[in-house]
Amino acid sequence: MPPPERARPADGLRDSVLGRDLSFLLVRANALTLAAANAALAEHGLKARSYSVLALAADDTRPTQRELAEFLRLDPSQVVALIDDLEKRGLVERRTDPADRRANVLVATDEGRELFARAQSSAHAVELGLLAAVTPEDHARLAQLLRLLAFPE
Amino acid sequence: MPPPERARPADGLRDSVLGRDLSFLLVRANALTLAAANAALAEHGLKARSYSVLALAADDTRPTQRELAEFLRLDPSQVVALIDDLEKRGLVERRTDPADRRANVLVATDEGRELFARAQSSAHAVELGLLAAVTPEDHARLAQLLRLLAFPE
């Protein structure tokens, strides 16, 4: 005999106080989006974190490891490991900062830039898929509101 | 002699391709919001994860451990550890599900409900602080858009 049908479907949780809590919605939206991004980036040998490091290296912002750690909200040791992996694969290089010879800045190689361009296409396709139910205006609005939370004054 | 002033401030990273990427904005908004929530919940002996479990226990949705794990996007072993901790503190109880005697559901004790109410006030105050620059209409819009990402069909 199958177990009786559950009287409390997932809808109950979704409509709970927590299911309407902005912080929790951020946690869950982030978890699902990261899972989708990691799946899409796997074909390029990347995950969301290594993709982020490669993106900043390819963007000519020439960040130091410390700036990367702060911006990505990671421990410096995590950033070092991510850079080591990308460097071994010939995708990024550490260079001495001309403005401060005690600091290293990160730059992407030509191969790194090419891989980033391909990975970015995959990541954007995933993002559009996740936001299929959202108008372009609301997509832009969502990004604008998230920026207020991501970069407080 | 102090090092020369950095020619690449954090603004460069913020205005980079990654700084406008929705997935990355979610990661960073989530990290900052979680850090603020954890700081506010500490006075109640909670963190965001234990607060979430307590919230669902206090909400009379009577979830099983499996439903909690799925909803919170955690491993079942993590959920068991969170429930164990809350149960030892007398805040929640595992009860046999009347609809399926093989399953346990989670309910909050009176003490758990009281603690949750106090913790919820702290969490909401933090959320309003983080969204001080956002109108109530945009706050509601943000929650609505995040729900589309958090609970895709």
Image (cartoon, coloured by chain):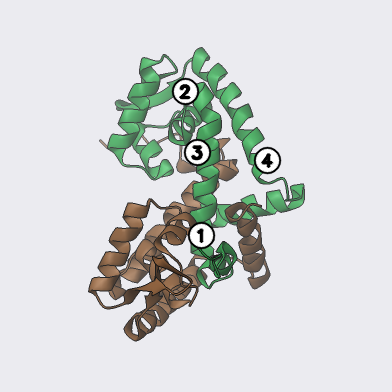
Chain colours: A brown, B green
Closer to the observer: label 4 or label 1? 1
Foreground residue among A93 and B66: A93
Query: Distance of mark 3 from mark 2, alpha carbons?
Result: 24 Å
Q: Chain of mark 2?
A: B
Q: Are marks 4 and 3 in contact (CB under 8 Å)?
A: no
**Mark number displayed over residue B45:** 2
Foreground residue among A11 and B23: B23
The residue that mark 3 highlights is A13
Q: Are marks 4 and 1 in contact (CB under 8 Å)?
A: no
Task: Please state the horizontal and vertical placement of residue A65, each as a whole percent of the image.
Answer: 40, 61
Query: Distance of mark 4 from mark 3, alpha carbons?
Result: 26 Å
> Is residue A123 placed above or below A149 in the rendered structure?
below
Q: Chain of mark 1?
A: B
User: Which residue shows up at 73% across the image and 51% down it?
Assistant: B134
In the figure, is residue B141 to the left or right of A65? right
The residue that mark 4 highlights is B129
Q: Chain of mark 4?
A: B
Q: Residues within 10 Å of mark 4 (few under 14, many from 20)?
A: few
The residue that mark 1 highlights is B1
Q: Quadrant of residue B75?
A: top left
Task: Name which residue type carries label 4.
Answer: Gly
Task: Please state the horizontal and vertical placement of residue B77, each as a whole percent of the image.
Answer: 28, 35
Query: Distance of mark 4 from mark 1, alpha carbons?
Result: 40 Å
Most extreme residue toward the left is: A88
Task: Please state the horizontal and vertical placement of residue A130, each as a whole percent of the image.
Answer: 49, 65
Task: Name which residue type carries label 3.
Answer: Leu
Task: Name which residue type carries label 1.
Answer: Met
> Looking at the figure, which quarter contains the N terminus of chain A?
top left
Q: Earlier in the sequence, mark 2 or mark 4?
A: 2
